[in-house]
């Protein structure tokens, strides 16, 4: 039994007859202190997946379990870092982090609280901005403040929802290094969602791709065997890195093309109204799938043109 | 700005260090210039700090239009600041002056029932009159309360002043008489030719009328004789009447000319009259002061009452018969009571504009605070619970558009029932005994006005608070869920701070609405205040009333502006998104 697992979860939105199935039959097992990266296209349902893991939404079918217990509601044990930082704009950086710490550690005295908050802000190199409001910070600094808040709660699982997608490439590199450093100092389970394959290969132990929505599901995982610490500069020459990256990229691009092909050839055909005839004497009808395949083949201009 | 000086000093230091001379002098000079340099750099850094502090103050209070002036004073980019000042200060001031000029030229051309539309200087004069009136009331109040030596000294000074002013008045009256004579002469000279013309015209018209009448009679006789047809008679009659009309029209032309000349104002006479009136007014006021310093002075009144009491006491002790003793004893007791009352008596000041402004502000703040105390909790409840919102929406929708006048009338009846005997109701006795507020005279009319203000001001605050509370960012709610905040913590730490900007925006609108409503309510309910001032002036119909009404209009506007600014500053303090507050 793994530490954090999603067992056949499905989530959909909308009313009863107008439902959009976002995730279908998602299964994921995360071991303790493992770094898992989930890559996927935009709009595939990545944020929904993380919200499921955090307990912010409930699956229609299936369960999410941590250490064997089902997750009923969000808690500071599952530290989620939102995609748009979610810092409270009327509080300074210090007060934002302190709010979280006070909830998780109500027994701290004032001095202990201050020391704890300052330690985590120093960890993300944000000490000069202690008393600034989020509106006065740049995007990278806000991201780091959000990370500090999540870390200060000392959660068992860290759920990062596209933490670096809104930053420029240089800041991204800096914060990637910080996340890796923090994880190596103080190992804990991390599930990170990203759309950058390089970043996933650099940081993760295992990469799980998310297929395209609607009805997205998790594909088969790609384990990353590269030894740590991983050096960004000479990773490009590493054969294993290049293989992994190409494999994953190819897989994702294939997913995209299949989806495109599916959507192009999805034609709604009105079948003529037929009365059922008793064919009990005739042999069995061909399988449903084959009839559909033959229909798409028949209607695809490529195949029918070059008959 | 200090760069040149510091460079000069630096070169001086260098030349000093390289010059010949004994060591002590050089050292002294060196330290002196060093200290001076330090002072200048300190001033430079501090001046920057002061400049930015001033600019931030202007920004918070919303007077950013004065920004370039401050920057110019500190020497930052003079050309750019001068451009800014020209564009955003000089041109608007010029535009306002153009509006004033338009007012000045258009106003005298429009003649109304209450006299001419006043020009700006007439409004300014009425402002000065109101100011002088309130100054005089204050002087009278101090005179009323003066005791002992100060009183005697002031009395002597005032009496000397009266004598001086009387002399001036006599002189001015002489000048006035002279001007009157001149004016009469001038008028007679101008009117004489026209009058003659009129008389001549009247004579001619009479002659023509008589001639025409004779003609008509002759024609009628001719008709009777049968020589002329009836048509000719009719033409003759018509001719007669048209000649009469023509004559009358000519007369009235001349009469109009005469009237125009009569109504022309003779400037020296007008000015002389104004001077005489001013000094006479002053003399009258000084006489009033004498009265307040001698007979009506509180200490004097107490003294006379005590003298009477003393005489009554003596008579009581000398009383022979029971009836006389009883009579004197009653007088003694009454005398003691009246002395006690007199000692506590305050000067009953007439209402001046400034007192009315104070009262209006007091009323509007009471109404506003009551409105805020109702609107904010109810608004939070509505924002949190959709059911409460659905329950209150019909009430809000129907009562929001109701005019303040209607509320005032309703409240006068409903709230008036609570105070059947306002003079002795404990509510009013309590408030009138409070030190600052008691002076304003809390009475039922004030309660009615405050209730009306509250009723009309509650809706914007309520709606905005409900909107602010219900439209919290989903992310913030997610943070609350992840941190497992309970209901009360969620409310105080996330919901209320997040809704603060909208709440204060609503309060700002509320205060503006309340101020507008108050003036209308005061005008109708005759509760002392600016509204009552305007209403009294309108009913009064004195020569200054129109100017006073326009003066009151400006006072209301300026006070409303400052109230609004105050709310903007408060709004800035609680807003966290640096949003620009509207004009």
Image: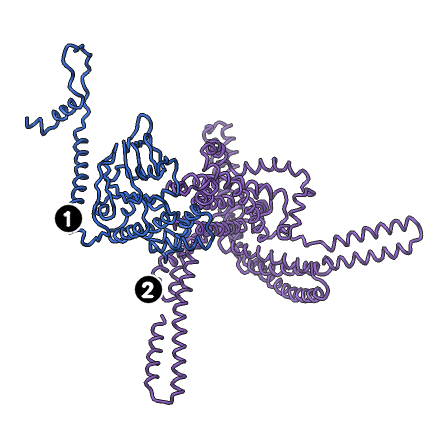
* Residue designated by label 1: A239
Q: Is residue B579 visible?
A: no
Q: Position of residue A301 (x, y in %)?
A: 10, 28
Q: Position of residue B492 (x, y in %)?
A: 47, 44
Other residues around mark 1 within 10 Å, as few (<14) / some (14–19) / many (≥20): few
- B110 or A258, which lies in front? A258
Give the structural element (helix, strand or loop) at label 2. Answer: helix
Chain to which mark 2 belongs: B
Chain A, which colour?
blue
Give the structural element (helix, strand or loop) at label 1. Answer: helix
- A47 or B260, which lies in front? A47
Q: Position of residue B92 (x, y in %)?
A: 39, 55
Looking at the image, is B150 positioned above or below residue B452?
below
Q: Quadrant of the C terminus of chain A?
A: top left
The scheme the figure's colours follow is by chain
Q: Which mark is residue B79?
A: 2
Q: In the figure, residue B91 lies in which quadrant?
A: bottom left
Q: Which chain is purple?
A: B
**Residue at the left extreme of this rendering:** A307
Q: Which mark is residue B273?
A: none
Please indicate whether residue B310 sits to the left or right of residue A233 in the image: right
Q: Is residue B376 visible?
A: yes
């Amino acid at each position: 039994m793994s530490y954090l697992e999603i067992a056949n979860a499905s989530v959909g939105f909308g009313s009863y007859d107008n439902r959009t199935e976002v995730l279908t039959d998602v299964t994921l097992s995360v071991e303790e202190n493992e770094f898992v990266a989930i890559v996927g296209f935009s709009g595939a349902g990545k944020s929904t997946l993380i919200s499921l893991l955090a307990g912010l939404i409930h699956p229609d079918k299936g369960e999410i379990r941590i250490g064997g217990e089902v997750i009923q509601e969000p808690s500071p044990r599952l530290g989620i870092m939102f995609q748009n930082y979610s810092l409270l704009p009327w509080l300074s950086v210090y007060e934002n982090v302190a709010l979280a710490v006070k909830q998780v550690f109500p027994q701290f005295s004032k001095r202990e609280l201050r020391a704890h908050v300052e330690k985590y802000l120093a960890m993300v190199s944000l000490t000069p901005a202690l008393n600034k409001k989020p509106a006065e910070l740049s995007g990278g600094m806000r991201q780091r403040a959000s990370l500090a808040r999540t870390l200060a709660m000392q959660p068992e699982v860290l759920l990062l929802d596209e933490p670096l997608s809104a930053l420029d490439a240089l800041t991204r590199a800096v914060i990637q290094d910080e996340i890796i450093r923090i994880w190596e100092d103080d190992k804990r389970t991390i599930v990170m969602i990203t759309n950058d394959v390089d970043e996933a290969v650099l940081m993760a132990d295992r990469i799980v791709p998310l297929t395209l929505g609607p009805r997205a599901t998790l594909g088969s995982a790609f384990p990353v065997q590269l030894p740590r610490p991983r050096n960004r500069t000479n990773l490009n020459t590493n054969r294993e890195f290049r293989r992994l990256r190409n494999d994953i990229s190819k897989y994702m691009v294939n997913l995209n093309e299949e989806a495109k092909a599916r959507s192009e050839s999805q034609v709604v055909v009105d079948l003529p109204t037929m009365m059922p005839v008793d064919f009990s004497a005739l042999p069995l009808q061909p399988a449903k799938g084959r009839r559909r395949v033959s229909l798409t083949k028949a209607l695809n201009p490529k195949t029918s043109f070059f008959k | 700005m200090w760069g040149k000086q510091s460079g000069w000093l630096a070169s001086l230091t260098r030349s000093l260090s390289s010059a010949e001379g004994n060591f002590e002098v050089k050292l002294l000079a060196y330290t002196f210039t060093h200290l001076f340099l330090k002072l200048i750099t300190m001033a430079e850094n501090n001046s920057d700090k002061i400049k930015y502090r001033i600019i931030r103050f202007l920004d918070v209070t919303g007077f950013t239009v004065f920004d370039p002036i401050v920057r110019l004073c500190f020497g930052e980019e003079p050309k750019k600041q001068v451009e800014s000042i020209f564009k955003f200060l000089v041109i608007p001031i010029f535009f306002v002056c153009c509006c004033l000029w338009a007012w000045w030229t258009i106003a005298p051309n429009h003649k109304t029932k209450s006299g001419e539309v006043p020009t700006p200087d007439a409004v300014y004069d009425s402002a000065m009159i109101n100011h002088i009136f309130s100054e005089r009331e204050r002087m009278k109040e101090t005179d009323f309360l003066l005791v002992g030596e100060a009183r005697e000294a002031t009395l002597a000074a005032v009496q000397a002043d009266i004598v001086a002013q009387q002399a001036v008045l006599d002189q001015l009256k002489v000048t006035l008489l002279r001007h009157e004579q001149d004016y009469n002469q001038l008028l007679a000279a101008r009117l004489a030719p026209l009058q003659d013309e009129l008389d001549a015209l009247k004579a001619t018209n009479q002659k023509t009328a008589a001639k025409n009448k004779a003609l008509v009679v002759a024609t009628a006789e001719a008709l009777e004789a049968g020589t002329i047809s009836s048509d000719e008679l009719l033409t003759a009659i018509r001719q007669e009447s048209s000649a009469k009309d023509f004559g009358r029209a000519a007369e009235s032309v001349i009469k109009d000319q005469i009237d125009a000349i009569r109504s022309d104002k003779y400037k020296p006479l007008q000015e002389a009259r104004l001077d005489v009136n001013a000094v006479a007014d002053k003399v009258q006021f000084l006489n009033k002061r004498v009265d307040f310093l001698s007979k009506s002075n509180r200490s004097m009144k107490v003294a006379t009452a005590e003298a009477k009491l003393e005489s009554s006491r003596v008579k009581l002790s000398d009383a022979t018969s029971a009836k006389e003793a009883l009579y004197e004893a009653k007088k003694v007791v009454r005398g003691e009571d009246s002395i006690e009352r007199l000692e506590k008596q305050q000067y009953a000041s007439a209402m001046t504009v400034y007192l009315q402004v104070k009262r209006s502000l007091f009323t509007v703040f009471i109404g506003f605070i009551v409105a805020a105390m109702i609107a904010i909790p109810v608004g939070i409840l509505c924002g949190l619970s959709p059911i409460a919102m659905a329950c209150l929406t019909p009430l809000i929708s129907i009562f929001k558009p109701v005019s303040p006048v209607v509320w005032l009338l309703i409240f006068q009846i409903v709230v008036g029932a609570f105070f059947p005997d306002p003079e002795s109701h404990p509510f009013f006795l309590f408030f009138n005994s409070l030190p600052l507020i008691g002076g304003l005279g809390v009475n039922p009319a004030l309660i009615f006005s405050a209730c009306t203000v509250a009723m009309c001001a509650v809706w914007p605050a309520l709606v905005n608070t409900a909107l602010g509370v219900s439209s919290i960012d989903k992310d913030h709610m997610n943070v609350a869920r992840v941190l497992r905040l309970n209901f009360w913590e969620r409310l105080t730490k996330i919901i209320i701070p997040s809704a603060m900007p909208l709440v204060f925006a609503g309060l700002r609108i509320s205060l503006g609405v309340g101020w507008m409503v108050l003036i209308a309510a005061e005008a109708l309910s005759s509760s002392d205040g600016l509204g009552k001032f305007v209403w009294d002036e309108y009913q009064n119909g004195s020569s200054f009333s129109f100017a006073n009404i326009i003066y009151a209009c400006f006072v209301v506007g300026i006070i409303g502006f400052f109230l609004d600014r105050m709310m903007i500053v408060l709004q800035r303090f609680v807003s966290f998104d640096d949003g620009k507050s509207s004009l």
